[in-house]
Image (spheres, rainbow, N blue to C red):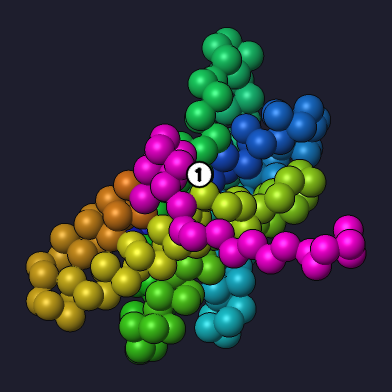
Amino acid sequence: MTLPAVLDFVGVAVFAVSGALAAGRKHLDLLGVIVLALATAIGGGTIRDVLLARQPIFWLANGWYILVIAAAALLTVAYTRWRRPPHSALLVADALGLALFSITGAQIAEHSGLPAVSGIVLGTITGSAGGLVRDVLSAEIPLVLRPGSLYATAAIAGTATYFALGRLGAARPIPSLIGMLVIVGLRLAAILWGLQLPVFKLDSPAGKG
């Protein structure tokens, strides 16, 4: 199995854990756990494949994705019965999944012959759209829209780093690894130290409420 394939399976497993933990926080049943895990793990990649007109969509072409996601979700449920996960487990798992999926999406766009800017966009979609779908289904404000999350921003920075290092001739897999480190580092910085972009505030005119 190639390294990109391994990273893809690791990515869906990590995102499945993120989705399962989110389902647990909403007290969903086992079907809800698996549905939320699936939406989180394959949402971004599905949108990417639709935009690239890749047929069949990656998880339809390889049934192992569904099995890995379901197994990761159920193992998460079993683990939490034995030991309560740390409060930050959802965010950490999501940061790892964001990094893995964003770089994988950027690589797929690159192999499709698209320019770097398009690769950054598709990498960001691959990494962040699944989490957005998860949050919408669990009635949460998506992380990508929350001030201080540096969610899509981290994906943009990491995928841009990946393409920049590739253009500079860095030997593989260095661009992929450093790109992932940038994404995880920015997300954890946002989580731990409140690192964020400037917030745009527009106050209502006086007397307008």
Q: How many numbered marks, from 0 up?
A: 1
Q: Is residue 82 magenta?
A: no
Residue 49, horizontal then vertical, whole percent = 55, 75
Q: What stretch is highlighted in magenta?
A: 186-209
* Quadrant position of residue 118: bottom left
* Quadrant position of residue 170: bottom left
* Residue at the image position 36 percent from the left and 54 percent from the top: 183
**Which type of secondary structure does the marked residue at label 1 adopt?**
helix
Residue topped by disc 1? 94
Q: Does the magenta stretch include residue 197?
A: yes
Residue 164, horizontal then vertical, whole percent = 22, 75
- Residues 144 and 99: in front is 144
Q: Quadrant of the N terminus?
A: bottom left
Identity of the residue furthest to the front in this view: 206
* Residue at the image position 77 percent from the left and 50 percent from the top: 137
* Residue at the image position 55 percent from the left and 35 percent from the top: 90
Asked if residue 39 shows in the view, the reply is no
Residue 19, horizontal then vertical, whole percent = 63, 41
